[in-house]
Image: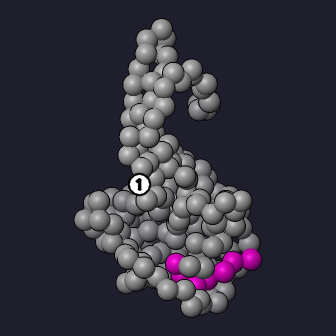
Amino acid sequence: MPKDRPASLAISKSEVVFAGKIWDIKRESFDYNGETLVREFVAHPGAVAVIALNDSNQVLLINQYRHPVREYLWEIPAGLLDQPGESKVEAAKRELLEETGYIAESWTELIEFHTTPGGNNETIAIFLARDLRHQGHDLELEGEETDMQVEWVPLASALESVLASEMRSPSAAVGIMAAARKLGI
């Protein structure tokens, strides 16, 4: 069975060439098979996402505008690992509540993946949340989150949309496929 493996290459130079609000662009020089290579990439804090399933195996989706692709995407609740000392599961709980008003009693790490490893070091951990209850919140949402739609969709229908390239958010696609596989859908 194929399995990714870590590598420790000697980095001779590392610099931030752009410091952004959420992530930076880094340029690093490293030795690879006797040759010095230079690569720029997005240095990302990492993220979490949540496949929230109700008792009818419906998945909780959000619809949000994403400016880089100029589309409203159907996604799963997700957010950055940007709170010092916060565990991945605690971040997932926070994001589910902030984006949907739901809390869950049952949490399981479902899958973890690199989003675009050729130019970004972002890794997303996706959690499966069950035993949900709507609590609501009084948080003031900002930017693209102000008009987010939240909708329950049968997991099988969401899977069909992913496989037909009608839903292209990577965390939604990976999470929906992993949940469908886990549940035998």
Q: Is residue 102 magenta?
A: yes
Vertical placement of residue 51 versus 38, above or below = below
Indicate the quadrant where residue 144 lies: bottom left
**Which residue is painted at 33% across and 58% down in the image?**
165
For image coordinates 63% across by 63% down, the residue present is 83
- The residue carrying mark 1 is 20
> Image quadrant for the N terminus?
top right
**Of residues 48 and 170, the one drawn nearer to the viewer in this rendering:** 48
Amino acid carrying mark 1 in the image:
Gly
Question: Is residue 103 shown left or right of residue 11?
Answer: right
Residue placed farthest to the left in the image? 70
State which quarter of the image contains the C terminus: bottom right
Query: Residue 174 magenta-drawn?
Result: no
Q: Which residues are magenta?
A: 99-105
In the image, residue 29 above or below residue 175: above
Q: Is residue 71 left or right of residue 21?
A: left
In the picture provided, is 152 more to the left or to the right than 83?
left
Tag 1: Cα neighbours inside 10 Å, few (<14), some, or many (≥20)?
few
Give the image location of residue 103, x and y in percent.
66, 80
